[in-house]
Image (spheres, grey):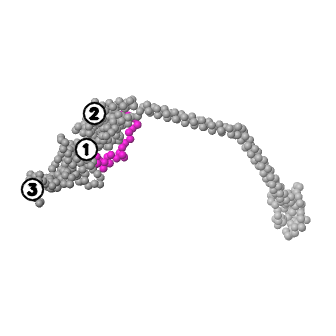
């Protein structure tokens, strides 16, 4: 016979208990009637899986041992996912949820906010993202450190161990290192404005070639001022290279990102800004040795090349080249003399022929053949009998000598060449 189940928990008995299913239903219904609630706790476990809808974390009471699981949708976890980590103190706005199947209680979170240090870290992370988007941390803005700075600007706390670490290590490496020091606050509210002002002041000094900002580590909260936008922008706008030596390897304030060189410690900063004198002397000695060796090898090679040249036949008998050219000149002279002789012979033959022609055509030759030249007293030659009249004086030129005569008559009729030859004067 079926018994009706009790309506209330107080009405249950050993003989008429509630099924576990009914208890789970009752608990679920009761818990889901609760309003959403703000709770505070410390994150002890965090599970954020890319690609999955829900993220899970476990909260622990700040003073007791109470723990509870919290499920968060992506839009709830997104604002703090880059800074949320185990140990973070948070405030969560959530509604309690009871899972009947496992009998477990869980909070369904709608909002989560970092408290205290976590909240400050979240603001710094947002500032980092904004400055990175503007290109403040880009490598293109990084300036090279000088090899040997004229003066090193040092920004640190007064009496801080970091100051001595930089001074001692720098001067151990380079005894002539010169410093201009500005003491500032290195933590608290007055840190950011004083450090930013010191950077601007040292940057304006002409002989300051590099600026070190150092603190030497500390708690995370103590290093937060070095992520202040005033310090970051002062370092970004400086014309002088900036070396950041604020924290240790695990610390990374925003000044480290904008600085031209991030030193892990003050000692590392000192080693970076000045060379090691002993190492430089050793390097210089090695360079001199290499240069000497190269020079000696060059001289040796040139001497060997010179020896090879001196062993050539021309240097064994320097006159040989002159003799060779002398023989060529002698041959050329012989050839030239032969050509000149042949040319003279040809020209002599030509001249002789021309002389014979000239001799045959000369008036003297004509006269020697029995002809005479008749001239007037004024030496003009008479070629026509019409030019003569009775009583004219004439001069006759013969092959040998001349004569003077007087015209007693002249015949103007044409005569043949034979008659002319037989009638010569």
Residue sitting nearer the eye, 203 or 114? 114
- Relative to 349, residue 333 above or below: above
Q: 213 left or right of 307?
A: left
Distance in Å between CA atoms under marks 3 and 1: 44 Å
Q: Where residue 394 sits: x, y (%)?
A: 85, 60
Q: Residue shown at 18%/50% (left/top)?
A: 105
In the picture of the structure, the residue carrying the numbered disc 1 is 86
Q: Is residue 424 highlighted in magenta?
A: no
- Relative to 177, residue 73 above or below: below
User: Which badge, 2 or 1, is on the more N-terminal residue?
Assistant: 1
User: Which badge, 3 or 1, is on the more N-terminal residue?
Assistant: 3
User: Residue 313: which quarter of the image?
Assistant: top right
Distance in Å between CA atoms under marks 2 and 1: 32 Å
Q: Residue shown at 23%/45% (left/top)?
A: 43
Secondary structure beneath label 2 = loop
Q: Where residue 17 sits: x, y (%)?
A: 12, 53
Instruction: Point out which mark residue 157 bears.
Output: 2
Q: Residue shown at 18%/45% (left/top)?
A: 40
Residue sitting nearer the eye, 46 or 181? 46
- Relative to 288, residue 79 above or below: below
User: Which badge, 3 or 2, is on the more N-terminal residue?
Assistant: 3
Secondary structure beneath label 1 = loop
Q: Where residue 258 sits: x, y (%)?
A: 32, 43
Q: 135 left or right of 118?
A: right
* Label 3 Cα neighbours within 10 Å, binned few <14 / some 14-19 / many ≥20: few
Residue sitting nearer the eye, 84 or 203? 84
Q: Residue shown at 31%/33% (left/top)?
A: 162
User: Residue 296: which quarter of the image?
Assistant: top right
In the picture of the structure, the residue carrying the numbered disc 3 is 7
């Amino acid at each position: 016979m079926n018994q009706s189940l009790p309506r209330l928990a107080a009405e249950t008995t050993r003989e008429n208990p509630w099924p576990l299913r009914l208890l789970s239903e009752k608990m679920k219904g009761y818990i889901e009637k609760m309003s959403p609630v703000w709770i505070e706790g410390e994150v002890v476990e965090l599970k954020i899986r890319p690609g999955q809808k829900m993220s899970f974390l476990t909260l622990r009471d700040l003073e007791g041992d109470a723990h509870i699981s919290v499920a968060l949708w992506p839009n709830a976890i997104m604002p703090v996912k880059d800074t949320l980590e185990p140990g973070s103190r948070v405030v969560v706005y959530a509604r309690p949820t009871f899972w009947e199947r496992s009998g477990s209680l869980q909070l369904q979170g709608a909002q989560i906010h970092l408290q205290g240090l976590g909240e400050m870290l979240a603001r710094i992370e947002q500032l980092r993202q904004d400055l990175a988007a503007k290109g403040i941390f880009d490598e293109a803005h990084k300036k090279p450190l000088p090899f040997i700075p004229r003066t090193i600007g040092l920004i640190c706390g007064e009496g801080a161990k970091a100051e001595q670490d930089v001074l001692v290590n720098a001067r151990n490496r380079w005894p002539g290192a010169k410093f201009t020091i500005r003491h500032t606050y290195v933590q608290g509210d007055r840190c950011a404005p004083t450090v930013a002002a010191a950077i601007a002041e040292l940057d304006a000094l002409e002989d300051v070639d590099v600026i070190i900002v150092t603190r030497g580590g500390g708690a995370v909260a103590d290093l937060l001022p070095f992520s202040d936008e005033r310090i970051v922008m002062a370092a970004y706008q400086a014309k002088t290279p900036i070396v950041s030596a604020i924290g240790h390897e695990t610390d990374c304030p925003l000044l480290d990102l904008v600085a031209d060189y991030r030193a892990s410690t003050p000692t590392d900063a000192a080693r970076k800004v000045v060379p090691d004198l002993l190492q430089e002397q050793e390097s210089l000695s090695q360079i001199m040795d290499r240069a000497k060796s190269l020079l000696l090898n060059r001289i040796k090679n040139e001497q060997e090349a010179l020896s090879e040249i001196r062993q050539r036949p021309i240097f064994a008998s320097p006159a040989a080249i002159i003799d060779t050219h002398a023989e060529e000149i002698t041959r050329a002279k012989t050839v030239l003399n032969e050509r000149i002789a042949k040319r003279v012979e040809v020209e002599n033959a030509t001249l002789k022929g021309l002389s014979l022609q000239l001799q045959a055509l000369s008036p003297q030759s004509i006269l020697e053949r029995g002809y005479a030249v008749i001239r007037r007293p004024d030496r003009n030659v008479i070629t026509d009998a019409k030019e003569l009249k009775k009583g004219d004086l004439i001069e006759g030129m013969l092959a040998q000598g001349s004569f003077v005569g007087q015209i007693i008559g002249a015949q103007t009729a044409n005569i043949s060449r034979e008659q002319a030859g037989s009638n010569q004067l």
